[in-house]
């Protein structure tokens, strides 16, 4: 993983099947990801949402109870060391042998699987091709260029923001960064902040901002240009800027002392691992 980042704060819950509680990013309650679970049990799980992983971690440590959560690779070791997640039994997952990224850092430790990877992608520079030149779209320094004052948008989470900050400095592995690197990345992000029109909370919000022309350049997840192009908007993503882009892989974890049904937990994850779910996330989410 090059540099990937995400964070969270608890938001409204969606109540459904009380026997399975999922702590997740907003948007992942989409039934197309786990239709087989609904077919079998007649309802979707109950969802509670976070906006970044640090918030999710702190909420769980404070006593919030759920059966599964959805962190990304940079958080997994911290969650495991804190004792809030426990291994899965992969013998209960028929598709386990076909899974990609199972060997991502921290996902499998001493032969025990702590994370079932379900989604991966990139965060990069997305831009309006009709209003931003190819030269300006070729470098992350454009985020701090005064000519884009009020026309920039970043995700409203610390991890994604610092992925941008570190990459802009030429740092591709923030695990190797120093305190001085952190300070320099923070300085860059302060310059970017002066140009920010708003910090986006989800892909739908960002798409509206870019479609209207309010935002010309954004630090976006890979789904944004895919969905916007499908709607006919002139938006591209440059994953090969001079400084690069961020990649991420995320998955579900088994929370210690989950209050719900273990059988339903495995039904849920097996629904996610079906080929049709992978096809849906690739074709519809990018």
Image: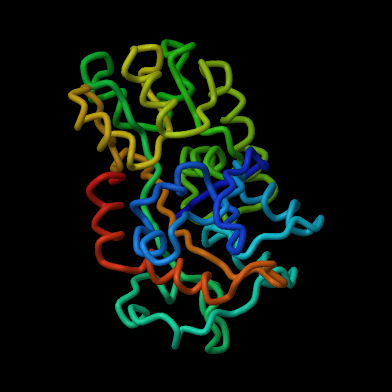
**Residue 53 place in picture, x, y as percent:** 62, 51
Q: Is residue 242 above or below residue 217?
A: below
**Residue 249 place in picture, x, y as percent:** 43, 59
Q: Residue at x 37, y 39 (%)?
A: 124
User: In the current view of this chain or complex, which residue is farthest to the front?
Assistant: 42
**Residue 122 place in picture, x, y as percent:** 37, 48
Q: Residue 237, located in which quarter of the rendered image?
A: top left
69 sits left or right of 64 in the view: left
Quadrant for the N terminus in the image: bottom left
Q: Residue at x 43, y 55 (%)?
A: 248
**Residue 194 place in picture, x, y as percent:** 57, 16
Report the front residue among 34 and 162: 34
* Residue 71 shows in the view: no
85 sits left or right of 162 in the view: right
Q: Is residue 131 above or below residue 90?
A: above
Q: Residue at x 19, y 32 (%)?
A: 230
């Amino acid at each position: 993983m090059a540099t990937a980042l995400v964070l969270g704060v608890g938001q409204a819950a969606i109540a459904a099947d009380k026997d399975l509680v999922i702590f997740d990013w907003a948007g992942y309650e989409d039934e197309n990801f786990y239709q087989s679970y609904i077919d079998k049990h007649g309802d979707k799980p109950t969802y509670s949402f976070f906006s970044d992983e640090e918030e999710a971690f702190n909420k769980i440590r404070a006593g919030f109870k759920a059966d599964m959560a959805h962190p990304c690779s940079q958080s997994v070791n911290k969650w495991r060391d804190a004792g809030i997640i426990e291994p899965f039994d992969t013998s209960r997952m028929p598709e386990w042998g076909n899974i990609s990224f199972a060997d991502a850092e921290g996902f499998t430790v001493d032969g025990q699987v702590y994370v079932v990877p379900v989604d991966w992608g990139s965060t990069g520079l997305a831009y309006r091709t009709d209003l931003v030149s190819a030269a300006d779209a070729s470098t992350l320094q454009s985020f701090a260029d005064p000519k884009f004052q009020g026309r920039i948008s970043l995700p409203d989470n610390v991890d994604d923001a610092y992925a941008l900050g570190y990459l802009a400095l030429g740092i591709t592995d923030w695990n190797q960064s120093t305190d001085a690197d952190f300070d320099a990345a923070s300085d860059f992000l302060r310059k970017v902040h002066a140009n920010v029109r708003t910090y986006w909370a989800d892909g739908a919000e960002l798409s509206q901002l870019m479609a209207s022309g309010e935002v010309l350049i954004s630090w976006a997840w890979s789904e944004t240009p895919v969905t916007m192009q499908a709607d006919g908007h002139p938006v591209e993503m440059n994953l090969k800027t001079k400084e690069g882009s961020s990649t991420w892989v995320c998955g579900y974890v088994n929370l210690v002392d989950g209050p719900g049904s273990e059988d339903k937990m495995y039904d849920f994850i097996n629904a996610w691992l079906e080929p049709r779910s992978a096809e849906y996330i690739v074709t519809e989410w990018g």
